[in-house]
Amino acid sequence: MKKYLNAGMAALLALALGACSQSKPAASATPEATPTPEASAEAEEKTKAVYTIYNVTGETVTDLYIYDNSGSDKGENFAEGGVKNGEYFDIEFDELPKSETENMEFTVEFKTEGGYEGKFETLHWEVAPIALLAEDALTGPTQIAFAVPDVKAEYTVYNVTGEDVTELYLIDNATGDKGDNFAEQPLKDGESIVIEVTEKADVAGDLEYTLEFTTASGYTGKFETLHFEVAPISLLAEDALTGPTQISFTKPE
């Protein structure tokens, strides 16, 4: 070891003497920066989990948990305060490195106010819709479906105008399309008809309709801000009006 050290010292001394004998000083070299491990490594991709929960159980959901299968703690009840039938909301988890989430599995578990329960035990870290299904809507072994569910509006229309209704339309305000005349076969005074509309749950809440009718004598009525809902609607006689519209959201006696 000593021999190599002496040889190295002699070489350094020779270089120093050579540098002193030059007429111009040697330019100093700027050392290259050594990349840090953080700078040289590519940033790892991160992913976020977002579950859009749709309650189509037919009743209020009182308990809803999404928890990691590797632990025993259920964590937060995301349905605290109650989630009504037809409502939906997002559950969002912070971003994590993709390598950490690839093998994660979760359980989604719910309970309704009537005591009906459902569970799915192999939920992955993903962005997905989750429909909580009614017991009579099950088509497989689990109580959830990974799809945006269909929801139904139902209007029970009662004719209390005192005469036949010959035209009855439910008009989508976004398109203005009148569609079918639900009184093509005249709706007689005292009779009723059920009008159903099916839409995806994520758009139904933004829809508005106009209900329009005409009687045999030419009397007309209209209501222009009908929401996507289940409701009774009475078509009123002209001499029975107590407000600005010709309909009432009540079932007649």
Image (cartoon, rainbow, N blue to C red):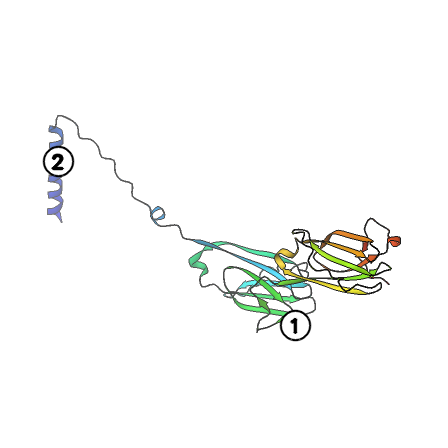
Q: Which residue is mark 1?
A: 136
Q: Which residue is mark 2?
A: 15
**Residue closest to the eye, 163 or 89:** 163
* Front residue of 62 and 70: 62
Q: Of residues 161 and 59, which is closer to you in this image?
A: 161
Q: Earlier in the sequence, mark 2 or mark 1?
A: 2
Name the residue furthest top: 23
Query: As shown in the figure, which amino acid type bears the numbered disc 2?
Result: Leu
> Residue 74 is drawn in which quadrant?
bottom right
- The quarter of the rendered structure image containing the C terminus is bottom right
Whole-percent x, y for residue 31 in the image: 25, 38
Horizontal arrangement in the rendering, residue 62 relative to residue 96 (left or right): right
Residue at position x 76%, y 58% in the image? 168
Q: Position of residue 61 (x, y in %)?
A: 66, 63
Instruction: Tell me: 92 left or right of 214.
Output: left
Q: How many marks?
A: 2
Q: Please give the name of the residue rendered at 60% of the width and 64% of the height, measured from the top-left corner.
A: 131
| Farthest right residue in view | 239
Q: Position of residue 218 (x, y in %)?
A: 82, 54
Secondary structure of residue under mark 2: helix
Point 61% across, 65% down: residue: 132
Q: Provide the secondary structure element on which disc 1 rests.
A: helix
Measuring from the top left, give residue 44's x and y in whole percent.
Answer: 40, 52
Look at label 1 and name its amino acid.
Answer: Asp
